[in-house]
Image: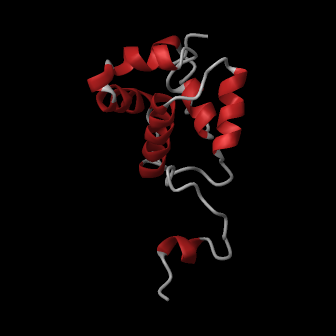
Amino acid sequence: MTASMDDILHPGDDEVRDPEFPHAPDGWTRDAALVSAGEDGLTQSDDLWEAVRALQEYFAKNEHHINVRELHDALDEKFHHKGGIKFLYKLLPGGPVAQGCRIAGLDPPSGSHDPSFGSVQ
């Protein structure tokens, strides 16, 4: 069998990933995300998981260059059909970037706790 690039870069990494979250960071689990969301008073929903997947995908594609403004704009565009960033603030009142990253198992980029970039707490 031919090894994938991931197999070459991470030999012996036989961790089973959730197929619904292909861009999840190593060690992230849906259960841990539910605990984090529950601590913030959030409930599980398809919209929450869609936001988590969007953040994980953005970070996977831009791992060496995370710009908060670009991330904010990308989320606004991705969720435009549901109301954009306003929708995300209703879904993640702690901020779509700051709170969303915490639930998605990602380190929030610097500046994400600025109220104008995704944190209202």
Between 68 and 47, the one nearer to me in the picture: 47
Q: Residue at 55% of width from left, 77% of height from top?
A: 8
Between 85 and 90, the one nearer to me in the picture: 90
Task: Please tell me whether residue 72 is drawn above or below residue 6 in the rendered image.
Answer: above
Where is residue 76? Give x, y as percent.
34, 25
Where is residue 66? Give x, y as percent.
46, 39
Between 107 and 30, the one nearer to me in the picture: 30
Q: Residue furthest left?
A: 81
Q: Residue at 60% of width from left, 23% of height from top?
A: 43
The quarter of the picture where residue 18 lies is bottom right
Split into 4 quadrants, where in the image is the C terminus?
top right
Where is residue 112? Give x, y as percent.
54, 24
Task: Please tell me whether residue 120 is drawn above or below residue 74 in the rendered image.
Answer: above
The quarter of the picture where residue 42 lies is top right
Q: Residue at 50% of width from left, 82% of height from top?
A: 3
Colour theme:
secondary structure
Classify residue 14 as left or right of residue 22. right
Q: Residue at 57% of width from left, 72% of height from top?
A: 9
Classify residue 27 as left or right of residue 43. right
Q: How many marks?
A: 0
Where is residue 6? Give x, y as percent.
53, 70
